[in-house]
Image (cartoon, rainbow, N blue to C red):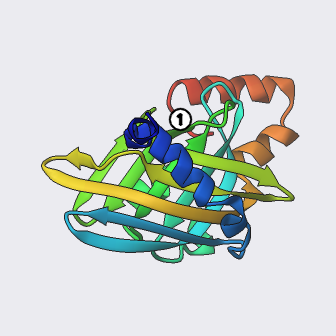
Amino acid sequence: MQTRMLRDPWVGMVIGLLCFGVEAVASLPTGQAAVTLTAGGRSIPLTHAYARLELDLESREQVAVLLTDATVPDALLDRGVSLWDLLANAGIANGLHFRLSGEGRGEDWKVVHPNVNTGCGICSDWVAQASQAAGTVQGKVFTAAVQTTGGTRWEFRGEFNAELKPGWEAAAEAKATPAQRGIRKQLRADGNHF
């Protein structure tokens, strides 16, 4: 009976998470990640961590996290471009992006690697476990199973500790009048970042 339980992948994952303790995440310096993104047999260490508050289409704040293999210049981070767009379109780094939902689930995923470029709105087997404390967001990310996209097998696993900064949209929203908030909400609903 005990042997059967340990063969269950969910039990193994829970045991693995307990062994992969929170202490390890807390020991990472702010702004750093220790995540490995592997695709098509090529592993890339993601060592930089960024987080900020961004607004969703309903004008609710969500924590966006970006983990990269290269430093993202401050000039790009401060231009009013979402972290998802930076990873997907700037071409400056390989990495992983996700947002934390109000329930603490990872969603709005983007993966960029020389061998795979993919994304997923809500994926049950792409996992983010994170918490916020004292201006930071820290946690773990992993794929519950090896993924396959376009015939390429890939996965990610590791931990991060990022400084949580206000995004430009959240800062503008805080200063806006109710009429301005309504206009911005409608623009976002139409797919515009404003």
Q: Is residue 65 placed above or below 7 in the rendered structure?
A: below
Name the residue type under label 1: Asn
Q: Residue at the location (21% across, 68% down)?
A: 41
What quarter of the picture does the N terminus occupy? top left
Quick check: can you spot residue 152? yes
Q: Looking at the picture, does residue 124 appear above or below residue 133?
A: above
- In this view of the protein, which residue sits in the foreground, 59 or 12? 12
Residue 176: x percent and y percent? 83, 36
- From this viewpoint, is residue 65 visible? no
Residue drawn at (47%, 77%) of the image: 70
Residue lying at 40% horizontally and 37% vertically, measured from the top left: 8
Question: In the rendering, at what x and y percent does residue 2 appear?
Answer: 46, 39
Name which quarter of the figure residue 62 lies in. Answer: top right
Specify the farthest residue to the left.
Answer: 151
| Viewer-closest of 67 and 4 | 4
Q: Nearer the viewer, residue 103 or 178?
A: 103
